[in-house]
C-alpha cells in the first residue's frame, strides 16, 4: 500500500480540547501551526511521523492556500509519502472518528475507494475540506489547471479531484470509509443510550457514527477489533419493531457477516409512550408491552436471517429517571415515576423471555444503576435521562465480559 500523508492547519488548542490525542496518531501527518501553537504542541508527545510546520495561517484558509500547502508538502517530500491529502481541522476533531488517524484505516480506505485524485464530501462540508491524491497529480496543479473539483462523477480533463463517493447525496464519511474494515466489528446501534452506556465520551464530538478500537473501550479482550457506535437519533423500540426497519439500519451502518450487534432501544418508550397507550387507548400493559417487545425481537431475528452475525445482544432499557426538571416538547414524560418503573420492569422481563426463546443474548445491567424503588440513581445519571458517561463502566464491562465468555 502506498504511503499517504495528511495535512491540516491547527491555530488553536480546540482540537486537543475536543479529545484529539497527538501521541496516538499513527498516520503520517503535517500540522501547519502558528509559532505560538507550534510551541504549545511540542510539549505534547508528538510521534516522529507527525511534522509540525510553522506557517502564517489566514483566519479562513482558501482553496488556493490549501493547494499551495499541498504542493509545498509534495516538493518538500514530507514523510516520504506517495500521496498527500488536505483535511480541514474541524472535520478531523468534530466529525471524522479519531480512529481513522490513530491507525492506517484512512490510508487503507483511500487506497481501496479512491487511488487517484479525489475529494471526500461529508454532510455539512464542501469538497475542499478533504481532498488530495498521488504526489504527481498534486505537483501538476497550476493556476491553469481548470476546474479543480469535478461536478460530475466522470473524471474531467486535466488535474481534477472527483468525488470518491456519491457527491449528490453525501453520507457520513465514518460509514463510507469504515467499509474498508475487513476485521470483525462490534456495532452498538440505537438511541442516545448507545453513547452514554458504551461509548467513550471523548470520542463522540458531533459524530452520529463513532469508530473506536475495542481495546480503547475496555481492557477485556473480545473477538472484535473495533466498536462502531451508531446513534440513530431519538428512535423508539416501536420504530425498531417495524418490519424491515432494523435490516435497513443495519445495512446502512455497514453491518456485515461476522460482526456483532448490540441493540439499544426502549427507554424512550418507557418514558413517553407505554403508559400513555394504556391510559389514552384503553390497552392493557400486557398488550402494549407484549406487542412492543415481540415486534422488536422479530426485527432483530430478521436481521440475523439477512446478515450472518456472530452475536446479537439486546440491551435492556436503563431504569427511568425521576427528574422533576425534565422538559421536552418532543418527548414529554407521561405519568408518575412509579408507573414508569413498573412499565420498565415488565418490559425487561418480557424481553428476557423472548430473547431466551429465540437464542438472543439479553444484557440487563439495571441492578448496577437502580435505586431500591427501581428508578435510575440520581448520582449515576446525567441529570436528564441517561446513565452519566462517567458511570458507564459497569455497562461496558458487563457487555465485554459477556462477549469474551461467549467467544
Image: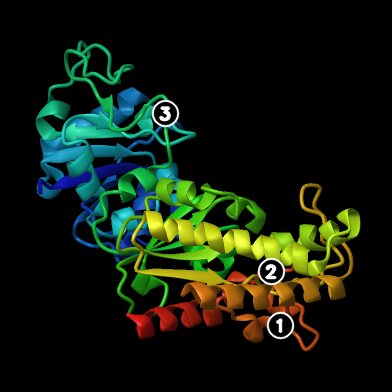
Q: Residue at x 58, y 66 (%)?
A: 196
Chain-order first, disc 1 or disc 3:
3
Left or right side of 130 for 323 = right
Which numbered dot is residue 382? 2
Left or right side of 71 for 388 = right
Foreground residue among 57 and 63: 63
Crowd tier of the residue under label 3, counting other residues whose Cα lies within 10 Å: few below 14, some 14–19, many 20 or above: few
Looking at the rendered structure, the secondary structure element under dot 2 is loop
Left or right side of 296 for 214 = left
Q: Residue at x 61, y 59 (%)?
A: 295
Image x and y of residue 335, in percent: 89, 64
Q: Residue at x 79, y 75 (%)?
A: 341
Foreground residue among 17 and 248: 248
Tag count in the figure? Answer: 3
Looking at the rendered structure, the secondary structure element under dot 3 is loop
Q: Considering only vertical position in the picture, is 60 above or below 144? A: below
Image x and y of residue 400, in percent: 42, 79
Q: Is residue 8 visible?
A: yes
Q: Which residue bears the numbered disc 1?
A: 370
Q: Which residue bears the numbered disc 3?
A: 126
Crowd tier of the residue under label 1, counting other residues whose Cα lies within 10 Å: few below 14, some 14–19, many 20 or above: some
Crowd tier of the residue under label 2, counting other residues whose Cα lies within 10 Å: few below 14, some 14–19, many 20 or above: some
Image x and y of residue 106, in percent: 26, 49
Foreground residue among 63 and 221: 221
Callouts 2 and 1 close, C-beta under 8 Å: no
Viewer-nearest of labels 1 and 3?
1
Image x and y of residue 209, in percent: 46, 52
Chain-order first, disc 2 or disc 1:
1
Q: Is residue 94 visible?
A: no
Give the color scheme: rainbow, by chain, secondary structure or one colour. rainbow
Q: Quadrant of the C terminus?
A: bottom left
Amino acid at each position: 500500500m502506498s504511503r499517504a500523508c495528511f495535512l491540516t492547519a491547527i491555530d488553536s488548542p480546540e482540537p486537543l480540547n475536543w479529545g484529539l490525542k497527538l501521541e496516538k496518531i499513527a498516520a503520517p501527518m503535517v500540522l501547519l501551526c502558528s509559532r505560538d501553537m507550534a510551541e504549545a504542541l511540542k510539549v505534547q508527545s508528538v510521534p516522529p511521523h507527525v511534522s509540525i510546520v510553522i506557517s502564517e495561517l489566514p483566519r479562513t484558509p482558501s482553496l488556493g492556500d490549501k493547494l499551495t500547502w499541498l504542493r509545498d508538502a509534495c516538493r518538500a517530500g514530507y514523510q516520504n509519502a506517495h500521496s498527500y491529502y488536505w483535511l480541514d481541522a474541524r472535520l478531523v476533531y468534530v466529525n471524522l472518528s479519531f480512529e481513522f488517524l490513530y491507525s492506517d484505516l484512512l490510508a487503507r480506505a483511500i487506497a481501496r475507494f479512491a487511488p487517484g485524485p479525489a475529494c471526500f464530501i461529508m454532510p455539512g462540508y464542501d469538497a475542499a475540506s478533504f481532498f488530495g491524491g498521488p504526489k504527481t497529480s498534486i505537483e501538476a496543479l497550476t493556476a491553469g489547471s481548470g476546474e479543480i473539483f469535478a461536478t460530475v462523477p466522470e473524471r474531467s480533463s486535466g488535474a481534477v479531484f472527483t468525488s470518491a463517493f456519491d457527491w449528490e447525496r453525501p453520507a457520513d464519511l465514518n460509514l463510507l470509509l469504515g467499509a474498508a474494515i475487513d476485521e470483525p466489528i462490534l456495532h452498538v446501534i440505537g438511541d442516545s443510550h448507545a453513547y452514554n452506556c458504551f461509548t467513550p465520551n471523548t470520542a463522540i464530538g458531533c459524530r452520529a457514527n463513532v469508530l473506536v478500537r475495542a481495546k480503547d473501550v475496555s481492557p477485556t479482550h473480545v473477538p472484535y477489533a473495533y466498536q462502531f457506535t451508531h446513534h440513530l437519533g431519538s428512535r423508539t423500540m416501536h420504530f425498531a419493531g417495524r418490519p424491515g426497519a432494523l435490516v435497513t439500519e443495519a445495512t446502512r451502518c455497514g453491518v456485515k457477516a461476522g460482526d456483532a450487534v448490540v441493540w439499544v432501544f426502549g427507554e424512550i418508550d418507557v418514558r413517553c409512550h407505554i403508559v400513555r397507550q394504556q391510559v389514552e387507548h384503553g390497552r392493557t400493559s400486557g398488550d402494549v408491552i407484549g406487542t412492543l417487545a415481540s415486534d422488536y425481537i422479530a426485527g432483530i431475528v430478521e436481521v440475523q436471517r439477512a446478515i450472518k452475525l456472530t452475536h446479537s445482544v439486546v440491551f435492556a432499557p436503563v431504569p427511568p429517571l425521576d427528574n422533576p426538571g425534565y422538559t421536552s416538547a418532543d418527548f414529554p414524560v407521561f405519568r408518575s415515576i412509579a408507573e414508569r418503573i413498573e412499565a420498565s420492569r415488565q418490559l425487561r422481563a418480557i424481553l428476557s423471555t423472548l430473547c431466551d426463546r429465540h437464542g438472543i443474548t439479553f444484557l440487563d445491567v439495571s441492578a448496577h444503576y437502580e435505586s431500591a424503588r427501581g428508578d435510575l440513581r440520581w448520582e449515576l445519571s446525567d441529570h436528564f435521562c441517561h446513565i452519566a458517561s462517567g458511570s458507564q463502566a459497569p455497562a461496558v464491562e458487563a457487555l465485554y465480559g459477556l462477549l469474551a465468555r461467549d467467544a
